[in-house]
Amino acid sequence: MTTVTTRFGWDAWKARVQALFARGAARGAARDAARETAVPVRDWISVSAGRPTRLLGFDQTLVWVVVALLALGVVMVYSASIALPDNPKFARYAPTYFLSRQLTSIFIAFIVALVALQVSIAQWERWSPWLFVASLLLLVIVLLPFIGKGVNGARRWIPLGVMNFQPSELAKLTIAMYAAGYMVRKMDVKEKFLQAVLPMAVSVAVVGLLLLAEPDMGAFMVIAAIAMGILFLGGVNGRMFFLITSVLLGAFVLMITMSEWRRERIFAYLNPWDEKYTLGKAYQLSHSLIAFGRGEIFGQGLGGSVEKLHYLPEAHTDFLLAVIGEELGFIGVAVVIVAFFWLTRRIFHIGRQAIALDRVFAGLYAQGIGIWMGGQAFINMGVNLGVLPTKGLTLPLMSFGGSAIVVNLVALAIVLRVDIENRQLMRGGRA
């Protein structure tokens, strides 16, 4: 009797253990299946005390980072430009002239961005070819002597009264849209060079010729990076991508070798402390490096910059980071770098999420804007720090410039629209 009871108890315990293992294996398989089908970004739920509390309609952190960069930019533009009226060139300007212009541009940009936010991504996709054509027409119009405004030998602006509009800024936005829509249309032939890549290459070449006629090589570099990045992310054959990259690099090298003043810039960048260049082509770079050196770790304090007192040209535009370095030190510069890194990474996450939801145009567009913001910020910071040759590119969202602020906020508003539609789809609704 004892043997039978023991035998019965062992069989029951064994069966129970096997059932537990089977249940655990089933749960593990379910988790693996959920991971494979889940979208890559799931931070659309606000968490409090470890528990979800409410659904968020948009990425609030993204908005606050953009607002913080805009606010710091306003403060630093005012600090960098307050002494400009002492210069005879700006004698008729009030000390708050550039501050008021920057605030006006931000106000206009917020209104335009709110309007852009109401437009669906599907509508932007339908408009993308026409917006690209419109930007091409504006790039032609700005070259006309009786329309385009020339400054320091460059004709890049169209006067609009309230602000001077720069068509090259709009071209950065429209090339991202056009390239994203182009890759969606050419998805079935992306392995064929002539059908998939050549038309896009011609479009970028036309934009490049118009920009070089202004001249604005910096904007051309950014636009080429946006187009190339979207082609790569869209799945263009690797050999084709490296072929196009080689052609573009060859074109840049050719432009530099054939232009004496561009060659001088490269030589000045390589040796900015040479007496031949310090008071010439490397004047801006040398004073930018002096500003960073004076800033050290914690800076000279807000308003304490000496280089902005007519030593560092364009301190409120292209070299705003140098003033930040001098007044706020390494800490201030590091905060700006981290903010742009986070912003770029977050925009890429939104694009990746859209692609995971089978929204290819929205995803490629968002990632193109990430390339734009991150790439232009990297180039501007590299120029200010002497890592890259001097190039006339502003720091996005921060440097003085009306049209740049407006187009930047419109581009980010459309990215936010992508995020909003992603979240609607994740809730089971419609974009």
Image: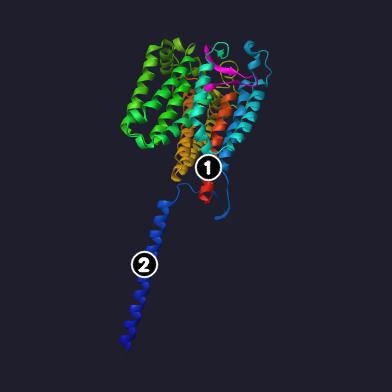
Q: Is residue 10 above or below residue 396?
A: below
Quadrant placement of the N terminus: bottom left
Residue named by callout 1: 419
Q: Which residues are magenta?
A: 152-167
Task: Please tell me whether residue 160 belongs to the stretch shown in magenta.
Answer: yes
Question: Which x, y percent locates residue 239?
Answer: 31, 31
Mark 2, Cα crowd under 10 Å, few <14 / some 14-19 / many 20+, is: few
| Mark 2 secondary-structure assignment | helix
Q: Position of residue 314 (x, y in %)?
A: 56, 18
Identify the residue under disc 2.
Answer: 22
Image quadrant assignment for residue 17: bottom left
Q: Is residue 11 visible?
A: yes
Amino acid type at mark 2: Ala
Task: Answer left or right for 57 relative to 370.
Answer: right
Residue 133 coordinates in the image, percent (x, y): 49, 24
Against 44, residue 232 (above or below) is: above
Is residue 238 shown above or below 34?
Answer: above
Instruction: Say which label, 2 or 1, has the lower sequence index.
Output: 2
Q: Who is closer to the viewer here, 392 or 173?
A: 173
Depth check, front residue: 247 or 10? 247
